[in-house]
Amino acid sequence: MSLALIVLAAGKGTRMESDLPKVLHKIGGAPLLHHAMLPASALEPERIVVVTGHGAQAVETAARIFDESAMCVRQTEQLGTAHAVAQARGALDGLEGDAIVLYGDTPFITTETLEAMREARRAHDVVVLGFEARDPGRYGRLVMQGDTLERIVEYKDATDEERGITLCNSGVICADCGALFDLIDAVGNDNASGEYYLTDIIAIARARGLSATAVTCDEAETLGINSRAELAAAEAAFQTRARQTLIETGVQMQAPDTVFLSFDTTIGRDAEIEPNVVFAPGVTVESGARIRAFSHLEGAHVSRGATVGPYARLRPGAELAEDVHVGNFVEIKNAALDEGAKVNHLSYIGDADVGANSNIGAGTITCNYDGVMKHRTTIGRDVFIGSNTMLVAPVTVGDEAMTATSTTVTRDVPEGAMAIARCEQTNKPGFVRKFFAMLRAKKAGQAKG
C-alpha cells in the first residue's frame, strides 16, 4: 500500500526566543525537521509533504536538503493542526494509500513505532500514537473503550474525570489519505482556542461508524521541543542514546559523556575514542582507528588503523587512508592522505594529495589560497617534507623527493630531488653585545632626562 507523509512544520516556536524557525534548531548537528523525517523515510513513502509557515523558505530549503523530492505547501494562517494538514490535500491528490501525520518538532519517534501504526491500520480506519505519561500535564487525553479509541480530549476542554487519564496523545495519526481529508472537512472550531483540532477527527470517525485505536510508545519518543531548555534536554537524550548504541556495537570510549556525536556519525567496532572528542556531521571512522583526546572532526573519513590527534582538526573533505597518522595541532582540510602517510604535529594540509608513506615535518603549510582562488598541492609517495616547509600551491613534489627544513617551495620538485630554498646564514661576531649595550645606554639616558 502506498504511503504519504505529512510533516507539520509551520510553527514559529515563540518560546524558543529565536528568529530561527523552531524546526531548524539542531540536535546532533541536524535540524529537528530532519530527525522527524528520518525514521519515516525508512518506510519508503511515495510522497512527502512538508507544511510550512513561519520562515517558510528556510524550512522548505531544509526539507529538500533532506529529500529533494519533498513537496512543500504553506499554511499562511495558523488556524490549528487540522487546518495545517488540510493544506496538504492538493499535493496528495490522487494518492491511494495511507497518510501519516508527523510533527517537525518531535524528533525521536522511531521507525518501529511507525511500522506498528501501519500494522494497526490493517484492522482500524484511524490509528493514533499515544503514550503513558508520568505527568500528563496539559496533554490531550485518549479516551479508550477496550482497544477502541472513542475520542481525544484537549486538556483545556477536558472534564476533571478526563484529566485523570494518563494515556496521552502524541498528535501522530495514520489513516487512509482520502478518509483523512474527508474527516478534516467536518472539523469545526467550537472550542476554547477557536482552532481546528486534528484530534477531533476521532470522534467524527466514530460517529460515522469508523473504527479507531491507539498504538503506544515510550514517552521519550514523543518529546516535543518548544523551548531552549527542552532543546538542551533533547540534545542530552540524543547524545546518551547515540553513545550507548556505539558502545553496544563494539566502540571503545574511555569517557563517553565527554564525546559528542552527530546524527550521522558512523564508527566501526574496535575503534577507540578518547575523551573530549567532537564529531560534527559527515564523519565515518572505520574499525580499529583511534581518535585521540580533544580532536574535532567534520565531513571526514578515517580508515582502519589510522590515528588522529590529540588536539587535531579534520575539516570537510579530509580523507585518511589506512594507517595514516595525524598528530597534535594538525589541521587537514579537503585533502587525501594515502596509506601510511604521517603528519605528526603543528601543520596545515589543505587542498592537497599526500602519497603513501610520505612524512610531513612539523610546521609545514600547504599555502593553498591566493586571496581569490584555492590551489592544490600534490605530494608523491615516500616523500620527506622537512620541518617548516611552505608549499605554495599549485605545486607538485615528486615521488621519493625531499625538501630541506625551512624551504619555501614555489616550483615543482622532480622525483628523487632535494629542494632547498632559504637564505644563506650570516653570523656577525660580537654584534649582540654591542647592540644591547647601545640600547641600555639609550634607555638610561631617557630615564635621567
Image: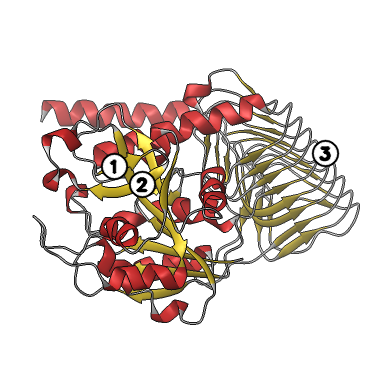
> Badge 1: how crowded within 10 Å, few (<14), some, or many (20+)?
some
Side of 386 relative to 35 (left or right): right
| Label at residue 143 | 1
* Lower sequence index among marks 3 and 2: 2
The foreground one among 207 and 400 is 207
Amino acid type, residue under disc 3 in the picture: Gly
Residue 174 percent location from the top left of the image:
45, 57
Task: State how far apart marks 3 and 2 are (Cα).
Answer: 63 Å
Name which quarter of the figure residue 412 lies in.
bottom right
Q: The residue tagged with tag 3: helix, strand or loop?
A: loop
Which one is closest to the eye, mark 1 or mark 3? 1
Q: The residue tagged with tag 1: helix, strand or loop?
A: strand
Q: Residue at x 35, y 68 (%)?
A: 51
Figure quadrant of the C terminus: top left
> Badge 2: how crowded within 10 Å, few (<14), some, or many (20+)?
many
Name which quarter of the figure residue 160 lies in.
top left
Side of 366 relative to 63 (left or right): right
Task: State how far apart marks 1 and 3 are (Cα).
Answer: 65 Å
